[in-house]
Amino acid sequence: SSNEHKLNFKKSKEACLSYIQDALLQKQWKRAAEFLTCYVESLEKDYSREHIGPSEMIWRIGTEILWHHSQSSMKEFNCFMEQMKTLGVKRYLKVCLEHVFHLLCNGQIDEAYQNLSLAESWRFGEQTAIQDKEMKLIQAYRGLLDYCSWSKQKNILLEHGEDGFADLAVEQEMHGYFRKAAVNLKEIIKIPGVWDVFVKCYVDLLEFYGDHNEARQVLNEYAYNSKFPANPNAHVYLYQFLKRQGESKKSLISALKILHDIVPSHELMIDFNTMLQKSKKRKKRRLGLEVIFGALDYAGWKENAKAWSCLARQLKQIVISEKHLDWIKQEWNSRKDWWPAFHFSRYLAKRNWQENKSLSYEKALVAGILLGKDCKYFKYVSHQGCKAQLKRFRMLKKFVTRHNPVYLRISG
Amino acid sequence: RDFNERCAQCSEVNWGLTDGGRFYCRSCHNVTERTREVVNTDFITNSRVQSISKGLKKQEKTDGGCEWYICEGFQLVLKKQVEALEALGVCPQMKDEILCNFWRCYLQKSKQAYCKRPAGETVKALSVCESSTDVDSDPERPSLLHLLSLSESEGDLQTDCSFASSLSKVSESTSVYSGSVDGSLYLMKNQKEKLRMTMPMTLSFCYMALLWVREPITLSELLRFVVEGHIPYLNVFQHFPEKMKLCGLDLKIFCVESWPVYEEVFNKMHELAAFLDLPRFPDITESCFLHPDMLCMKYLMEANLPDELHNWTCRVVKKIGIGEVDFLTLMPGNKSTRKVKYDVLAAAVIVVVLKLLFLLDDHYEWLLSEFAEERNKNNTEVCMFYSGGPYFEFKKWYEVVKHSLDVEQKKLDEERAKYLWRCEKPLFYSVKNKSKVLKRRQMVVNLQNQFGKLSGSVQHAEKPNPSSFQLSWSEENTDGSCFHGHSLKGILQEKYGLLTAMNPDYWLCTVKLCNEKLCGHLAHYREVEFPQSYHFVLGLFSFLLRIQPSYIHDEVCMIEHKLFNKKLCKKLKYNTVLRK
């Protein structure tokens, strides 16, 4: 039993690590460095049984300290990273990659590119095959930097083009970068994963060179292949591409469907609703109502005048046509308990009126339809509006008053 | 030097020693066959001892190393340790007379030297790949991995599997890898009967010698000095001479990576004393530092408690007879008497006295403190001067001591986390991984430099001078933070001409003592089951002595049972509170 409290190397280093951790969390870089200095001798012992060994600890902790410490320079940082690369062959590419990220954060694009090229040429027996994923990432990032270079050249060319110059050398260079970038970007996006930046760049290249089919295929794969993790951005990119291509409303709508399912509060829901509202198909219009109600469930949309105007427009249209009032009822059913306090309180009425009259107008219309002319919100806003002698508010009051029976039917 | 024969050639008596250990005549350079048995504590080559009977051929290896035996290594360690003790002020006889003789006795009894057939002989059998003559070794030749896994020390070297696996490829016919001659033998043989030497045991030797000479250093102090670096322990091997190459299994023996534990050193010391058949140790009398009366005085001072409490500790000591010479003096081999831990005992006496006077039930002591506070407020300074100091207020004492204790504990915890275990001397299992080890060391040094610079103004503080007192309180402080001179009169009363405590109650830590031989402890301490004040007091002495509170708790239980022995026998029914 006396062995429990025996102070030994292992326990001493564990304690040291927890001091380092505390210091890091409190951003006390000097103190963290002090304890790290004492920890590094762990390298001289073998921890092959542990999950994370001292060399990985030292790499990660040292990186943090050197990145944030006021007295540390980029030169020291680079020197440290080079040492870390020699520490563990199994981690070599990972360390290289993270080093590159830091260089990029520091704006050292050329150094980053050099490191990537160096890492790409690394070979180490069976490790090369084991670290295949990291290698692909390295190639992908090099492709990304090639894309950046391509982009720069493109801009130069466009500028010159305005002046009437045609610079062949620049053009050749540009094409060269394109080839290098395309090869690597294409490879990485084959692997299931979240590759937003790579996909965007690759599609940009394809579009520029007119390969729309390939672009479409890439985006479809990225959005619809079930092996890839669910990614709202994939659908956004696809939608934006289709829009650029001038596709039909039908395909645009289908592109946004899954986005609505994953992220009902996405900003594109306004576009979605707008398209759906105008559709001839009943189902689509029904969906549109669902979409706009769903978006306004989220706090971030509370003060979005455009969203409210979409909802107001659709509700108004339904009320006037007197068809499909049951749609409103269905949507309102699950919301009538909490939307009044969430959106239509007296406090909000005052605030909306003060800050944004258009917003209060749209909301008042919605409130008037859903809650009737006697609800706090509508009363306040319409009163204020009429007092201010704004014409549309007078119209609003008339409209709601006229259609008040509708409210009774909805709420009943 | 002790060789007084006349030279066969020139009849002179003028002898010197060759490198081979043979006597040669300085006048005519005649070399004899006689070798010298080395008896001083310098570097011995046991090979000389053997060469009387056998005559070793090679003594120098090609790499500049030489053959050396494990016990020689330990001898060096002991030498370094005792020299450090001397530097601390221990009497010089300890080195040349006491420890030296203990060590020789040990070598003799464990048949490693000074006897006809040193145990080292059997090493030869092992390395020549013949059947071992060992009685208790298993029939198969043990592999390196097997040897590495036999361990009483923690398996830090075990984790160097990669090294081990590369070494197991070494063919079985060569001796299992170590720089010393008998490294493998040392680890393999079941040496329970012969008390195999270990690093913690070196401290047992030191403590035994200190006890024999009755030096004013307790075991807890000794261990603290070790941790603070005043006594070499952790990386002593770096002081071995260049010729003694340390590698392979030697590392397992000499490179420890944990601090020795009080119990371990203590128990080993007693085992050792019995093994060496030592007689009764010199008496521990009332004037000795290790006597409870003396130690209590020291600890009372260090705990910032009033000097008046000393009367009470003496009374308790006398009443239960733990101040008797026969109780305190060590009689090796006597299994019936309980072994005395002088420091823990003294601390426990103080705890018992505090319980007697203040009850320490998280209630009464604070009540007494309030009374004292009231009285202190009302008294003038003149009054206090005549009546011998202000009334002792438990609350104030608690606040002052807790504060200091927390500060020191925090410092200690940080020191422990920052401790550097490695030394400059590189260690490697074999020449194969020497380069890897050196590379690693270089990297470690680089990283230490890099991050050391970023550590701010921290510099490696000079080792503080070893001091006997960890907490000190000065009477000159005007802030009233020193309680030595405070008076206990607020809590005492006179009855039949005798001063007794006003507190009429006492609670026992445990009603029944455990059987120490079976479960290792007299009682089992769990913080939640006892009052906070009691826990605090245990914690204070636990810090001072650097041991677990449960050890002090054990001694407290023992003292209480002696103190209330009669009442306990009568009133076993009542669970907690007994009236005095």
Image (spheres, coloured by chain):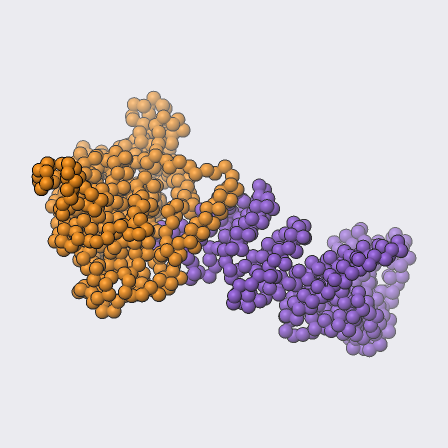
Chain colours: A purple, B orange
For image coordinates 42% across by 54% down, the residue present is B435
For image coordinates 51% across by 41% down, the residue present is B453
- Residue B331 vs A152, above or below: the answer is above
- Residue A165 point in image, percent of width and height: 87, 55
Q: Quadrant of the C terminus of chain A?
A: bottom right
As rendered, which of B398 and A90 lies closer to the eye?
A: A90
Position of residue A103 in the picture relative to residue B524 (left or right)? right
As rendered, which of B220 and A89 lies closer to the eye?
A: A89
Residue A173 visible? The answer is: yes
Position of residue A300 in the picture relative to residue B375 (left or right)? right
Residue B316: quadrant of the picture: top left
- Residue A271 point in image, percent of width and height: 80, 66
Q: Hey, which residue is sitting farthest top in the picture?
A: B382
Residue B242: quadrant of the picture: top left
- Residue A129 vs B33, above or below: the answer is below
As rendered, which of B462 and B160 lies closer to the eye?
A: B160
- Residue B467 point in image, percent of width and height: 32, 35
Q: Quadrant of the N terminus of chain A?
A: bottom left
Position of residue B107 in the picture relative to residue B404 (left or right)? left
Position of residue B315 in the picture relative to residue A34 (left or right)? left
For image coordinates 90% across by 53% down, the residue present is A389
- Residue A398 vs B329, above or below: the answer is below
Residue B375: quadrant of the picture: top left
- Residue A284 point in image, percent of width and height: 79, 75
